[in-house]
Amino acid sequence: MLATPLPYIEVNPPSQDPTAVVIWLHGLGANGHDFEPIVPQLQLPESLPIRFIFPHAPNRNVTLNGGASMPAWFDIGAAMEIDQNGLKKSVFQVKDLIQQEVDRGIPSNRIILAGFSQGGAVALETALFLRKPLAGILALSTFLLNTEGFGTAKTATNADIPIMVCHGEQDPMLPLMMGRNAFESLEKANYNVSWHQYPMAHEVCLPEINHISQWFQKVLG
């Protein structure tokens, strides 16, 4: 499948070449700028120079929002009906971003795929079945798209990939149980997964950012 390259924002470490990359996918209706401000908040040490890639999802009509056009990784309906073709295209585009970073000299096992909400669902869908080893998956306030045959379908390449799943206890968009179900499905499939919940809505909070920073340093340090 040929996919149009995704435009993106790139944030490089200030004083040295990166030794790792985080590709971070935004949520429905947002864009790559949404998580750009989080980079300085992570307060990562200079000894861990990371390049951040924040891609922009293409605009498409979203059934859930009355058919309005907005940045989205795939179309989704009120009953969580997923446009599989749109999803597959996004997965291919994210794979292309991963390959781009490999071609720039970053080994795939030094690349973390992160995502929030709809972007987190795409991050999981991409990374869990990728045939290149990744450093980890960060899944924020999100859900699993495809759980049928989940445990048997996983690739040996990323069977032991570290996965951090985070969710807000008062999330009105994607209730806590959706994130919890994703975590439990991953745990049941014997993935190396951790769970964190916070007293927040569909957002990120400072304690969560601190935990993400610690996890980045653990996984990439």
Image (cartoon, rainbow, N blue to C red):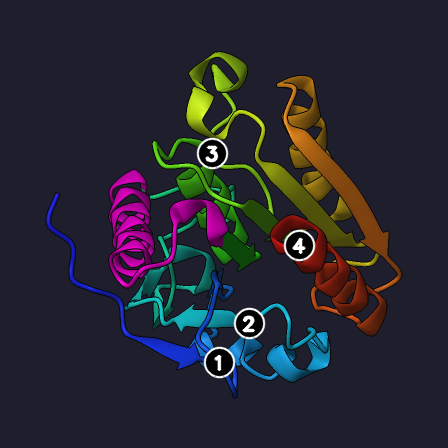
Q: CA distance from mark 2 to mark 3?
A: 25 Å
Identity, as a three-letter code, of the amino acid under mark 4: Ser
Q: Residue 176 in the image: x percent, y percent?
A: 76, 47
Q: Residue furthest bottom?
A: 14
Q: Is residue 65 magenta?
A: no
User: In the rendered structure, which segment of residues is drawn in magenta?
Assistant: 84-111
Which residue is labeled 2 in the image?
Answer: 49
Horizontal side, residue 48 vs residue 106: left or right:
right
Residue 190 falls in image quadrant: top right
Report helix, strand or loop for mark 2. Answer: loop
Identity, as a three-letter code, of the amino acid under mark 3: Leu
Q: Are marks 1 and 3 in contact (CB under 8 Å)?
A: no
Identity, as a three-letter code, of the amino acid under mark 2: Pro
Residue 168 showing in the rendered view: yes
Q: Residue 38 in the image: x percent, y percent?
A: 64, 78
* Crowd band around label 3 with a 10 angstrom C-alpha radius: few (<14), some (14–19), many (20+): many
Q: Main secondary structure of the magenta part?
A: helix
Dot 1 or dot 2: first in sequence order is 1
Which residue is labeled 4 in the image?
Answer: 141
